[in-house]
Amino acid sequence: MSDNQFALDRIKDCREKIDIIDEQLLTLLVERMDIAVEVGTLKQTIDMVVKDPNREQEIIDRLSTLTNNPLSRNHINKIFKEIFRAARDVQ
């Protein structure tokens, strides 16, 4: 097997793994949104505003300390800001 073929095979294997992870991420995001809907309903019952910047910052701070990989705090911030925005949309 040539080096090129080996690399192409490994790329294919890696992409298949990424596809599986993407599906898992989507499943978890849907679960998160379902919980966000419940939180939104509960917030409405007590006249609480949907957006909670302090809670969002707490989450980003906590998650930033959990990773020792290529995801920088900035990446985590950007990713989760979008997740928070989607959660607010469903609330």
Image (spheres, rainbow, N blue to C red):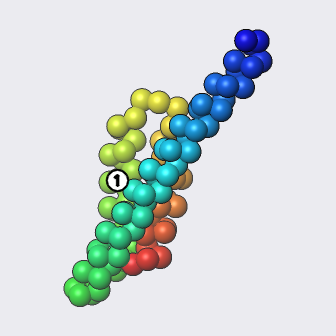
Q: Residues within 10 Å of mark 1 (few under 14, many from 20)?
A: some
- Could you say which is closer to the camera, residue 24 or residue 63? 24
Q: How many marks?
A: 1
- Could you say which is closer to the camera, residue 22 or residue 32? 22
Is 16 above or below relative to 50?
A: above
Which x, y percent locates residue 8?
Answer: 72, 25
Please state if 44 lies on the left or on the right of 75 as rendered.
left
Q: Residue at x 66, y 29 (%)?
A: 11
Which x, y percent locates residue 63?
Answer: 37, 45
Residue under numbered circle 1:
59
| Residue 76 visible in the picture | yes
Query: Seen from this angle, which residue lies furthest left?
Result: 46
Q: Quadrant of the C terminus?
A: bottom left
Is 73 above or below relative to 78?
A: above
Which x, y percent locates residue 1?
Answer: 73, 12
Is 36 above or below relative to 60?
A: below
Please state if 90 lies on the left or on the right of 59 as rendered.
right
Which x, y percent locates residue 79?
Answer: 51, 53
Q: Residue at x 49, y 52 (%)?
A: 23
Q: Residue at x 44, y 50 (%)?
A: 24
Please state if 33 lies on the left or on the right of 1 as rendered.
left
Q: Residue at x 31, y 69 (%)?
A: 35
Residue 27: quarter of image = bottom left
Residue 7: quarter of image = top right
Residue type at mark 1: give it. Answer: Ile
Query: Seen from this angle, which residue lies furthest front?
Result: 1
Which element is circle 1 on?
A: helix
Residue 9: quarter of image = top right
| Residue 74 visible in the picture | no
